[in-house]
Amino acid sequence: MPNACSAGHGSELLFAGADGNGFTLDGAGTAHYPPSLPLEPKHIEIRAKLDVDARRFDACVAIKLAVGRTDSEAKLRAITLDAEQFHAIHHVSSSPVGVSSFHYDGHRLNVVFKAPLSQAAQPEETLTIEYTVLEPISGLHFSPRGGGSKYAATDHETERARYWLPCIDYPTVRTTFDFQVTTDESFTILASGRSVDVDPAGLGASEAGGKTERWVLDFPCPSYLYCFAIGDYSKAVFEPLDDGYRAASAAGTDDGSYEVAAFAAQCSDEDFRRIQAMPVEAYGPRALHDEAALSRTFGRTREMLVWLAGLLGRAVPWDKYYQFTFEGGVGGAMENVSLVSWSSVFVNDEQMATERGWLVDCVNIHEMAHTYFGDAVVMKGFAHAWLKEGWASYVESLWVEKEHGLDAAQCYMFMKRLQYLEEAKNRYTRAICTPRYDSAWNMFDAHLYPGGAWRLHMLRRMLGNKDFWTGVRSYLDTHWKGTADTHDFRRALERASSCGVSLDRFFEQWLFSSGYPALSLGVLYDAAMKTCSVSLEQVQQFRLPLSVEGDKGKLLFDLEIEVSVELEDNKWEHRVATLSSDASLGGKIVVQFTNLEKAPLQVVLDRDAKVLFDLSVATNAGTLFGEAMLRRMGLDNPISAWAKLNAASLLAKHCATNSAAKIILEMYHKESNWLVRRLLAEQLGASGTQAAMKGLCELLKQESDSRSLFGIVSALNNYRDPQVAAALQEFILESQTRAAKALALEALGGQRNTQHVSLLIQHAIDDDKNPWWAWVRRGAIAGLGASRSQEALDVLMRLATADAESGAEFQQARCERGGLCLTRVSIMAALGNAASWMPIRTRNEVADVLAGVVRSDSDAYVRRAAAAALSKMGDTDSCMTALNLFVKSGCVYQDKALAERFLRAARESRAGVGGRAHESMTALEKVVEKMEKEIKSLKDKVERFEQGASKQQKE
């Protein structure tokens, strides 16, 4: 799953009811470890019939078990398989020993053999299960009812194969597969592995009148990475590349800033020939995506295969590289073995290609990187999931560097730092590598993706390109077709080190401990001593893990931070500040620059983005690190894109003045890189000043690059002001963008002005304003939810409770245009937001609707969204009953912990019996709004005063 899709998942953990740390529900959480495997599945043969219309899967599965050695006969007498909510299990048998009995409780299938299995007597046992799956709530997903292309496809991460396949649903259990299925004659059939001929002699009466195909996968594969997709699909075939591309794939950018070129060599002749001969294709539901759209979206796939082979020293090991899209099921994209699945929302028309084509390429390379990190080398447990998601996220940044240059790569890592710190500061901190979690699904957060990527980036910078990439290739070679954990990766890097480096301390601090360095910076100049003192102090408050110091010590990091001082115009001096984890040193250091005739022009920390840390400016008197120095650092003479972005961040966070905002605006106008501009706009949004707000409104009119526009609109979402509302409204009416317009509609709703509701309604229901995948519609629906308008709530209720006739019409339109599932998820979330500020009678009406969705909707994602919305309304009549039902039977297995969070949040809100808590919150909100208006008035007066003072100085 891509980092782009983890943000919303991570935000689910914001719900109340967690412990003080927020990551787990109670205390330290439950420890999870890989299962022992005295009977280990090695091969799975599936003979199935799929009926898409009936949403039915009938199968006979034969599982070949390898018998291990153990002193416990009981462990060799029985096996338990995950099998969630099967409609029926018809027959269970085994050979040669045979089955004595079996028991199925709706969740697990326990099979007892007639005698303990013996490795000496018979090293293998084949267990055969005949069963039916009917309308599964997850794992095996079917096309929406009501129109459009028909299809069925699987998506499993993290523990959802169990909804259609009896298995030990854990990553360390890896099997080969033989999949034969019969279905509608007109359907395309795809699966992991390679297509082989069907033996006609093996076909029975059940296969008559349909289409039967067989796919074989010889590469050992965990259950969560196996996939099939069957349906009415369009197809795009990607031809071999020109022979000259291989050299170009390792070349640098025009300005020579391509650092990746130092280790991304040309792929070998053998690998290039293999990739050229490999079928590379993309598929999508015919009613939604034609060949042109698929080609536009996935057209660079073969180029990426060549580049990645050069980077990692070997080609992907698959017989093919196929990708397919579908609606519902997959939350983003998924790295299934040789058959990558995507949400159809990623498929681009021409407009979306200009807005998000670069991001889709990042997701593409992310999923491809999983071939190496996750598929070919499988994690030994979800505690080590960073070895796949951290790696895939880091490869994104390397691709950005290759495509757009070093400045863009530093921007990308800046974005990843923001994502990680946002979660770590505002939600919870946890160790990157930990076996303690409520659900494996909860591990897939911003700690895992950008947090893991940053740890890899620091290791690369610490070891150097040569040793790092030698170690990475050795790690892949050693564990290819096997499993690995965090210690395996550490040992591979240590073996590759040319200077005998030990990484135990780094891994203890950065992977097994919870937190990150927070540095306070001070810059003082002593004219008499001609000395500039740069002080750094670790001010984070995280604690050491229990295993280190009994949970008493403050977590300090060992850091080497480069300090760069500009003595005079373009004359620099660089020193390394070494901070120790030794508590007796207090986490402090002072670096001195001597013989300075005057104060330095600027001081820059970590100019090349080598270390992850949060930075604040010390408030001690006499510090030089103020607005003037930050102007030099970000505008007048930036030493790197990284320094420029950090200057903007500090200007916004620590200065927060109109003059600071104007510096950032100058930086924006001077900047040529679209990604830098996008991030500068977001920093303007964080500053909260009137000058920043007005500047953003102007930028919204001036910016022509749709990729940067998204950052501007995102920044304006921080303001509630008539000028912002007017700018957003004008943009919505004139812009042809999709994603940026959707965000603008949401921001317009957040202005809470009833005059805007009609425009939001128009974009929410008018198909002519939604030419592609309901992007605009979903933004308008979110805006309606944010508007706190009764009229908006009425529209949302109609969309959620449409009668049979209008509901069918609405669903038919969505099926033909796409986005049905995502639209309905948006409606549920918007209902929860809108109703939160309504009287108790209205909230009861909304809660009844949401409760009905939780009880009976066929889509697991929609049910979950309704439950999330309902959790905010614990004081309503139907809330608790519906949420209790959701916890017991309505949610997917891996969402059980999340469902419990919903229930706890509802209980807390229910503490205000009769709506008193809600009324209190509403009153408090009104006070806050009044204070915001007063603060805005004061800011306006200050700005007018500053303008008058500036005018007098000029005169």
Image: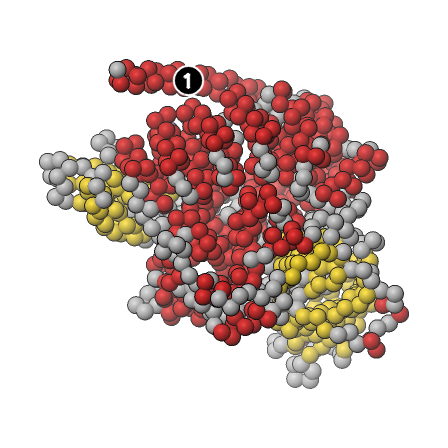
Q: Position of residue 475 (x, y in %)?
A: 46, 69
Q: Is 595 rendered above or below residue 39?
A: above
How crowded pointer 1 is (Cα within 10 Å; few <14, some 14-19, many 20+) is rated as some
Q: Residue at x 81, y 65 (%)?
A: 211
Q: Residue furthest bottom?
A: 121
Q: Quadrant of the C terminus?
A: top left
Tell me the quarter of the picture where residue 459 sits.
bottom left
Q: Position of residue 163 (x, y in %)?
A: 72, 57
Of the pair 287 and 764, the residue shown nearer to us = 287
Q: Position of residue 603 (x, y in %)?
A: 26, 41
Q: Is 939 rendered above or below residue 292?
A: above
Tell me the quarter of the picture where residue 810 sits.
top right
Q: Position of residue 755 (x, y in %)?
A: 62, 19
The residue singled out by tag 1 in the image is: 940
Say left or right for 505 vs 892. Answer: left
Q: Residue furthest left?
A: 528
Q: Residue at x 68, y 28 (%)?
A: 762
Q: Residue at x 78, y 60 (%)?
A: 187
Say left or right for 63 vs 911. Answer: right
Q: Is 452 rendered above or below residue 204?
A: above
Q: Residue at x 62, y 55 (%)?
A: 295
Of the pair 911 and 325, the residue shown nearer to us = 325
Residue type at the position of mark 1:
Asp
